[in-house]
Image (cartoon, coloured by chain):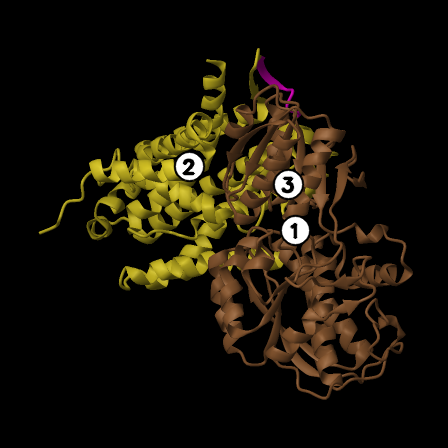
Chain colours: A yellow, B brown
């Protein structure tokens, strides 16, 4: 039982990171029908920004600030930086192609992804950086019940992921911007005719999606420590898978998909075999696609006549 | 930010150095003797040799383990600069990035084969990549020499393959003996990273451990894994040692931290792929290495090279010096061909490399090859990670 709960915690930690990445994919797809393959790199940049803030403020071993404000600063900088990066990408890589055939922005997205990866390699070098979190928040802080251990870092990551997801849900369902986003997603042309500034909504979507990716980057830095120029690739792939499982374009679906993949990875590694972890995750994807082609919470696409 | 500017500057300096070197030898700063490196041999010393050839170098210059690839690349460049300066030759490197990915390596190799300027290849880095390119180079009759691929079967399988590092047939038993005898391990968990390097080494270590009466269990995890905590939770409490034949040191660092997070006290024992004092610093762990820490060798010629390299490129681990040695082996072979009055060609260099006989090298040992292309008399070293993260030689 303890072992089960432990794996549950492991899975939820990983899952909440995937969920945050998946949200960015899903939101952009919902509005533009574009697979933003550069999203994983935005997440990578968020992780790097968090790292540089941490280093500038003394590093994990001798921070000049108390831990709480330090973490807040890292999150804010990572989120804001990633958000701005998302807006810039939209402006220069996607907007000029808005009316091009759908394959063009897709290629542009892959190009941006490689561009950011190579830039990170050039600017930050190929070294792995590490947040060295145990120095900042020792593992011993947290809950310890017999063999079960939940470190403070994990609680922090899961907690902030929940806060961000609740905030996003409220934003989309309760605010004017959220309403505009839903309208644009439903029918872009009609929304424009109703006086919605579509460009602004798209920029806002990219900003919010990228902010979430930036937060995920800092979280991964905190809990999984390693930061490097290539980290966005696999994480992006998993985030994308999560978005598809949940039903791409659907916000609760992305959260559900992320959690599901995180749990599937943790449980398959512990109960079946770590060897086949990815096989199992992508096997689940295939089964879900066969049974529900539009994803768990996605609505079937209607053909316009 | 400061650091990134520093690296940019370094890259610029390196680029300039390469340009300057390839522009010919007029730019003598302090004369040549700085380069009477370890390679003088019996080829007539510092007499200038008119010899031109391109050497391909394959390595993971980008991707997951770009840190290793960049170190190898820098040492190869350094070797070429030193050699050209000291011997008056004009060798050049042609770079091919493999990302430690067999598929990438198999794309680069045909490009090298079709580039008729390339007479021999240094690399690739990983055993899985050597397997991917071995027959391509074999069919083209190109000699290739790896500075880090240790899987045992490679030299048997591929006729034109050489290496300057010992094989896993040595590493597995060396590590296993140390675990069983010195650490008194009863239960060992081996986790491979699903590459042919890793599974091969895991197998040879398993065999040696079982022979010593140790109980072995086995897991396996992808190199691209984000999180190892599920695996760490599953480590049985009676496990004494976890053996990680991995290639990505930062992964092992995270795994070690997650073991501690989950309250497990098994000791980590890493293979040569984890030798990376910057990335892997779980105190109390062990790491084996195919090369000595050359900064600790007390040969003045080697220390001079270390200082010159650090001056130009900064710190390094154990992956660079074997690359220097491998590159030097190729250049020595080409120079010998030139001195014999022939043009360096794939055929002549391949033949000459088999006869390599360097009495001294940067690795602190002579370089000669067995019939298969393995280096003679190479051994593995074992280091322990100290409390402050530094590596101390224990065997």
Q: Nearer the viewer, mark 1 or mark 3?
A: 1
The residue located at (19%, 50%) in the rendering is: A190
The answer for which chain carries disc 2 is A
Q: Secondary structure at mark 1?
A: loop
Residue A276 badge:
2
Residue B215 badge:
none
Are discs 1 and 2 both within one chain? no
Are discs 1 and 3 both within one chain? no
Q: Is residue A166 above or below residue B83?
A: above
Q: Is residue A224 above or below residue B332?
A: above
Which range of residues does the magenta coloring cover?
A: A138-144
Residue B167 badge:
1
Neighbours of disc 3 within 10 Å: few (<14), some (14-19), many (20+): many
Q: Secondary structure at mark 3?
A: strand
The residue located at (73%, 32%) in the rendering is: B283
Neighbours of disc 1 within 10 Å: few (<14), some (14-19), many (20+): many
Identify residue for label 3: A130
The answer for which chain carries disc 3 is A
Depth check: B386 or B141 in front? B141
The residue located at (65%, 20%) in the rendering is: A140
């Amino acid at each position: 039982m303890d072992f089960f709960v432990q794996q549950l915690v492991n899975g939820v930690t990983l899952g909440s990171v995937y969920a945050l990445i998946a949200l960015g994919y899903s939101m952009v797809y919902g509005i533009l029908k574009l697979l933003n393959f550069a999203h994983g790199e935005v997440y990578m940049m968020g992780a790097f920004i968090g790292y540089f803030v941490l280093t500038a403020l003394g590093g994990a071993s001798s921070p000049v600030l108390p831990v709480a404000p330090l973490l807040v600063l890292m999150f804010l900088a990572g989120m804001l930086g990633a958000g701005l990066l998302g807006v810039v990408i939209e402006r220069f890589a996607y907007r000029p192609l808005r009316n091009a055939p759908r394959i063009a922005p897709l290629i542009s997205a892959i190009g941006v992804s490689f561009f950011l990866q190579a830039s990170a390699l050039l600017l930050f070098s190929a070294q792995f950086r590490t947040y060295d979190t145990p120095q900042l928040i020792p593992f011993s802080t947290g809950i310890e019940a017999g063999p079960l251990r939940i470190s403070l870092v994990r609680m922090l990551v899961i907690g902030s992921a929940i806060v961000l997801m609740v905030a996003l849900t409220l934003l989309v369902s309760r605010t004017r911007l959220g309403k505009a986003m839903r309208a644009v997603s439903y029918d872009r042309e009609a929304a424009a005719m109703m006086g919605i500034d579509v460009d602004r909504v798209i920029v806002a979507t990219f900003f919010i999606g990228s902010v979430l990716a930036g937060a995920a980057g800092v979280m991964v830095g905190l809990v999984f420590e390693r930061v490097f120029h290539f980290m966005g690739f696999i994480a992006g792939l998993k985030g994308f898978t999560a978005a598809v499982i949940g039903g791409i374009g659907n916000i609760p679906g992305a959260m559900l998909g992320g959690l599901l993949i995180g749990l599937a990875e943790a449980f398959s590694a512990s109960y079946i075999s770590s060897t086949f972890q990815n096989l199992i995750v992508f096997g689940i994807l295939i089964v879900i696609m066969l049974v529900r082609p539009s994803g768990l919470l996605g609505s079937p696409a209607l053909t316009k006549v | 930010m400061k650091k990134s500017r520093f690296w940019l500057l370094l890259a610029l300096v390196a680029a300039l150095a390469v340009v300057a070197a390839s522009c010919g030898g007029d730019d003598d700063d302090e004369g040549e003797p700085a380069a009477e490196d370890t390679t003088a041999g019996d080829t007539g010393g510092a007499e200038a040799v008119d010899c031109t050839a391109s050497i391909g170098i394959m390595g993971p210059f980008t991707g997951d383990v770009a840190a290793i690839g960049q170190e190898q690349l820098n040492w190869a460049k350094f070797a070429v600069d030193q050699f050209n300066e000291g011997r008056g030759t004009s060798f050049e490197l042609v770079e091919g990035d493999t990302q430690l990915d067999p598929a990438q390596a198999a794309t680069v190799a045909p490009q090298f084969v079709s580039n008729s300027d390339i007479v021999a290849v240094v690399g690739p880095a990983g055993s899985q990549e050597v397997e991917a390119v071995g027959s391509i180079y074999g069919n083209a009759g190109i000699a290739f020499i790896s500075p880090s691929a240790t899987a045992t079967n490679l030299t048997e399988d591929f006729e034109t393959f050489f290496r300057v590092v010992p094989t896993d047939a040595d590493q597995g038993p060396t590590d296993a003996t140390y675990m069983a005898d010195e650490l008194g391990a009863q239960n060992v968990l081996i986790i491979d990273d699903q590459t042919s390097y890793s599974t091969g080494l895991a197998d040879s270590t398993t065999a040696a451990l079982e022979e010593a009466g140790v109980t072995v269990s086995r897991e396996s995890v992808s190199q691209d894994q984000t999180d190892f905590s599920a695996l760490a939770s599953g480590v049985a409490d009676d496990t004494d040692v976890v053996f990680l034949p991995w290639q990505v040191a930062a992964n092992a660092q995270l795994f070690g931290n997650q073991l501690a997070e989950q309250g497990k006290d098994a000791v980590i024992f890493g293979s040569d792929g984890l030798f990376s004092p910057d990335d892997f610093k779980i105190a109390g762990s062990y790491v084996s290495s195919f090369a000595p820490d050359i900064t600790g060798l007390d040969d003045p010629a080697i220390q001079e090279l270390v200082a010159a390299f650090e001056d130009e490129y900064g710190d390094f681990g154990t992956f660079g010096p074997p690359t220097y040695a491998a590159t030097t082996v190729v250049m020595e072979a080409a120079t010998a061909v030139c001195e014999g009055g022939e043009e360096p060609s794939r055929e002549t260099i391949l033949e000459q490399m088999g006869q390599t006989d360097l009495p001294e090298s940067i690795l602190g040992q002579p370089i000669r090859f067995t019939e298969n292309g393995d280096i003679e008399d190479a051994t593995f070293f074992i280091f322990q990670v100290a409390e402050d993260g530094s590596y101390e030689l224990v065997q």
